[in-house]
Image (tube, rainbow, N blue to C red):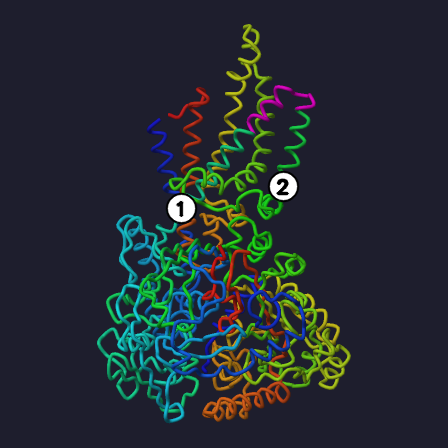
Amino acid sequence: MLPFLFRRTLGALVILFLLTTFTFFVFFAAGDPAQMSCGKNCTADNIALIHQNLGLDKPITTQYWDFLVGIFTGRNFSVGHCPAPCFGYSFATKQQVWATLLDRLPTTASLAIGGAVVFLTVGLATGLLAAWKRGTFVDKTFTSVSMVLSSAQIYILGPIVMGIFVYSGLLESPRYVDFTSGPAAWGAGLLIPWLVMATIFTAQYTRMSRSTMVEQLQEEHVRTAKAKGMSGRYVFLRYAWRGSLIPIVTILGMDLGSLFGGAMITEYTFQLAGLGRLAITSVTTLDLPMILGVLIFSSALILLFNIIVDATYAFIDPRVRLS
Amino acid sequence: MNAFSTRRARAVVVALAAGSLALTGCTSGSSTNNDKAQTDKDAAAQAKAVPLGTAKDSTGPAPEVKGARKGGTIRVYQRDSYNHLDPAQMYVSDQRDLAKLIFRGLTTYKQDDDGKTTLVGDLATDSGTTTDKGKTWKYTLKDNIKFADGKPITSADMRHSIERMYAKFITDGPMYVQQWLSGEGTTYRKALPDGPYKGKHLPDSVLETPNDKTIIFHFKQPQPQLPYALAMAGHSVVPDSKKDTKDKYDVDPVCSGPYMIADFKSGKSMKLKRNPYWDPKTDSARHQYVDGFNITFNHQASDSTKRLISDQGEAKNAVSFTNSVEPTLTRQALDDKSASKRLVQGYQPYVWQMNMNMDRIKDKKIRDAITYALPNGQIVRINGGSYGGEIAGGLLAPTVAGYKKGYDPYGKLKHPNGEPEKAKKLLKEAGKVGMKLVYAYSNTEIRQKEAVAIETALNEAGFDVQKKEVDAASWYQQMGKVDNGFDIYMTGWGQDWADASTVIPPSYDGSTIQDGSSNYSHIRDQHVTDEVKRISQITDPAKAADEWQKLHFYIVEKVNPAAPVFYTKMLQLYGSNIGGARYNTDINYLDPTTLYLKK
């Protein structure tokens, strides 16, 4: 297991390095960020000062080296010291990129975890039930409803739900309240985004868990188990379900990685200030350090979840060897 | 009074992109109707020159708002976060709005219940005294004025606040005062290249502080507009102490207004709390009724409008400082029995114009043809109808002193959808039927909708329109390039105070043309340049206003560098538990200084 984790982590770091390098050179070599952060009363002197303050007066390779070193050792900028891991200061807000990312992470994590709990619970339950009752009215109902819901989009469903529940005063407006300052308020503030997100994701998990269960029920080891005289329910849950989890865990890992990286549309629709919203704002304001920070941070989270998923395979399916 | 400024222009972007535009006059309180007569009356009121107040006008406390009570926190739904907190970097509308609550300067605007506005002393005892028609201005500071950390505000702080605007890291604030003191354009910076930070100061012959209470400005030329310029957020006071951390000050300023920043998470939220050292007896223009403001960002106009129309839960205690009623929800807001009682409305200072690049379109007949062909009425409808704007006949807004209602030399009011036949005739006379017109517009929803209407109308008039979509984020930078490669493009502009001197020189003086200039149509007319110089020296505001208007008529009729399109208006909603809501004719939004919670 350990060698596997080491190998995968090393691979992830290489990917992160390549991604960082590519992004840095694409963004920083493409134009002069000082022009964008300089206001209307801008002269050559002002530009020179910004270059100096941001370290942009140095060769691009030196800037890149400083950036990389800063991640591990921290850096000094004119606006203050940036402790490790230092991703620099935002051009637009003058806040430290890393501090901003950490500030936005709880919103995104709460959205992702809460949403995942709902869509995973409901999705797996309905999928299993549909597989159990294959060919019946229940199966057909779940299958067709999930088909319809999986084609819905958050930016369509979100405003409709807001109109029905929030603007009518039935439920609280979506907002993020820190979990530590009150779990009830935390849950109430995120209830609508969770439900909307879950509605769309649930459909996917219903369909997938149903189809993989149906496949598993036709596998030889399941037939053998049945032939041994085990009860239908035991075989269904102990043998077939376990086997069906691998593709679900794979998809869940990818979904969680993406959601942790920032559920842009969900956060935008519900006015939540998470990483997704930060990514949108950074792009629209051409805030290069923040774009770079969000990209690296989100990519790291996606890679992390991929490693977790791969490691989880071993627990679910003993046939998978990690050595 | 300089070549700058896409900034005011950018303020238009803030307003428009928020879906913001809406109607009518500067009525106070809960004015709700769509009565055009009232609109006209209020437009006229807003177009009056703001008088300079006396020491009595400047003495606090401000008259109590009827029924006001203390306590509670107001929720604020805002679209955009604040880019700057250093007052010297503040310029655009939402920053000016915040500055009203947290900063103070030498002068400010005081508005009474009838919407009458007076320029009064804020930290100063009056709006300023001059004995030589504006060459020298003297200000005396009030007693008991303090920063939010308890430090008394002295003339050294005021001097510091002016001098630090010369430093290189200040690139976004107003430049009027520095230019008047030390030179035009950006040459003023040479007078104090490092600001006051290396021990150097402007000589007493320029800026004098003979004692802790007195500050005297000495100009080479009379500057009768100084009291108005000093009321801009950019000239708010900054302490002459270690707490001025230069470029770091932009994230951690020392407040001086009735409220101070308790917490700010850029792009997410801001909390304001009472400033314990603000003394109402020193402030004739502001109140401190509520305990604080809880502002969250990322609320599009559609979201804030729906929340405020529904008036449920926390929305009862909510406002938006700068989001307007979303144009498509205007009718719903007006028809809703409850919401219609919770509206404020007024003119904004912006005029949208279709610039015609005079480097590329040299024949006035062609420019006139474009002006006649433009479908102003359709463009206004796209911007929210009569609640979003009003067809413009000229290039000066109804909020500029001396505005002449009904001025419409191209008959846009009579022919709101354009006169294609008349335009075609002019084009034929110019021998340019079928002429290619490269039309640039930004990639926002409203501008895209406008582009379709404009393209259709111009093609009908005999042009061959080539549309070019440009990124909204860099729109003004791209249009500000002298060699921008476009024939026609729309921009917005608003005055810095109700005087044409903050509109005509930056937009139409040919001597300002350079990359980044706001003379977007590249008008180079010697008469205009000469007149700008001459009128800038007139010390009588009423006479100057008349002369600016005459020059305005010359520009529109004899040169026609830009077709007038529409004047912008603002319509805003507030929650049912909010009291003291009124339109502020200085910031042109809901007045944040008079708000209270009813219970």
A126 part of magenta stretch: yes
Q: Residue drawn 52% across and 50% down? A: A268
Q: Secondary structure at mark 1?
A: helix
Q: Which residue position holds label 1?
A: A297
Three-letter amino acid code of the residue under disc 1: Phe
Q: Quadrant of the N terminus of chain B?
A: bottom left
Relative to A320, say whether A281 is above or below: below
Q: Chain of mark 2?
A: A
B526 part of magenta stretch: no
Residue at the far top: name it.
A229
Location of residue B205 (image quadrant) = bottom left
Q: Which residue position holds label 2?
A: A152
Mark 1 or mark 2, which is nearer to you? 2
Viewer-proximal residue among B540 and B269? B540
Can residue B355 be seen here? The reply is yes
Q: Chain of mark 1?
A: A
Three-letter amino acid code of the residue under disc 2: Ala
| Mark 1 → mark 2, Cα distance in angstroms | 29 Å
Q: Which is more N-terminal, label 2 or label 1?
A: 2
Image location (x, y in percent) of residue B588:
52, 71
Image location (x, y in percent) of residue A252:
50, 33
Residue at the far front: name it.
B67
Dot 2 crowding, Cα within 10 Å, few <14, some 14–19, many 20+:
some
Region rendered in magenta: A123-138
Q: Residue drawn 57% across and 20% down? A: A216
Main secondary-structure element of the magenta-colored stretch? helix
Image location (x, y in percent) of residue A322:
39, 26
Dot 1 crowding, Cα within 10 Å, few <14, some 14–19, many 20+:
many
Viewer-proximal residue among B46 and A221? B46
